[in-house]
Amino acid sequence: MIAIGCDHAAVELKDEIVNFLKEKNIEVTDCGIKAGEKCDYPDMAEKVCGMITSGKAEKGILVCGTGIGMSIAANKIKGIRAACCSDHFSAKYTRLHNDANVLCMGARVIGPGIALELTDLFLNTEFEGGRHQRRVDLITKLEEK
Ligand code: RB5
């Protein structure tokens, strides 16, 4: 299950990603919002990340104007490793090396074409483990400090 959410700056992009995932038969929970509604990105980040930390979703996608606000908020939540990406290399390597579980993107930064490709890459790249596991464990330890 993939959980997805957006603020008012990225509703169209969020809807495109939802349709893209559905076409690929990937289960998706759309946490909102709908066109015409407004929300503050930290609230949406909390909602989508809660789906992950409660085990209801495996990964999350958060979109706002820049993707940055969503990623800052998401990374405050224990167990969340959110990466704000606008290029293919970052979307691939944040899975391979950081085991990122949330992809953040900016609707005012990239177009839907790139966003859908980054989504695909993010969801279909496995964490490499090995020496990277130790580093991810060190990130987890930071949560206790
Ligand atoms: C909303 O105007 C905008 O600030 C938000 O979408 C996002 O870009 C924040 O990081």
Image (spheres, helix red, strand yellow):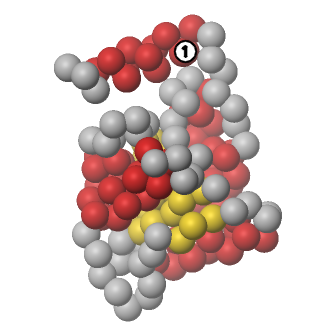
**Label 1: which secondary element:** helix
- Hey, which quadrant is residue 109 in on the image? bottom left
Q: How many marks?
A: 1
Q: Position of residue 64 (x, y in %)?
A: 38, 65
Q: Is residue 61 visible?
A: yes
Q: Residue at x 20, y 20 (%)?
A: 145
Amino acid type assigned to the residue bearing label 1 in the image: His
User: What residue is at 29 percent from the left and 75 percent from the top?
Assistant: 39
Residue 124 vertical position relative to residue 97 in the rendered view, above or below: below
Task: Specify the quadrant of the image occupied by residue 144.
Answer: top left
Above or below: residue 98 compared with residue 117: above
Residue 54 vs residue 22: left or right?
Answer: left
Residue 23, image x and y in percent?
A: 78, 70
Vertical arrangement, residue 96 with respect to residue 134, above or below: below
Is 36 above or below relative to 7?
below
Along the viewing direction, whichever of 67 and 21 lies nearer the viewer: 21
Farthest residue toward the left? 145
Instruction: State the residue lying farthest toward the right.
Output: 24
Label 1: which residue? 132
Coordinates of residue 133 in the picture (x, y in percent): 54, 15
* In this rendering, position of residue 8 left or right of residue 26: left
Q: For this rendering, which residue is in front, 116 or 75?
A: 75
Question: Which image quarter is the N terminus in?
Answer: bottom right
x and y, in percent, of residue 108 in the image: 41, 67
Q: Is 21 placed left or right of 30 in the picture?
A: right
Instruction: Note whether residue 114 is visible.
Output: no
Residue at the limit of the structure toward the bottom, as seen here: 36
Category of crowding for the residue at label 1, using alpha-carbon neighbours closer than 10 angstroms: few (below 14), some (14–19), many (at least 20) = some
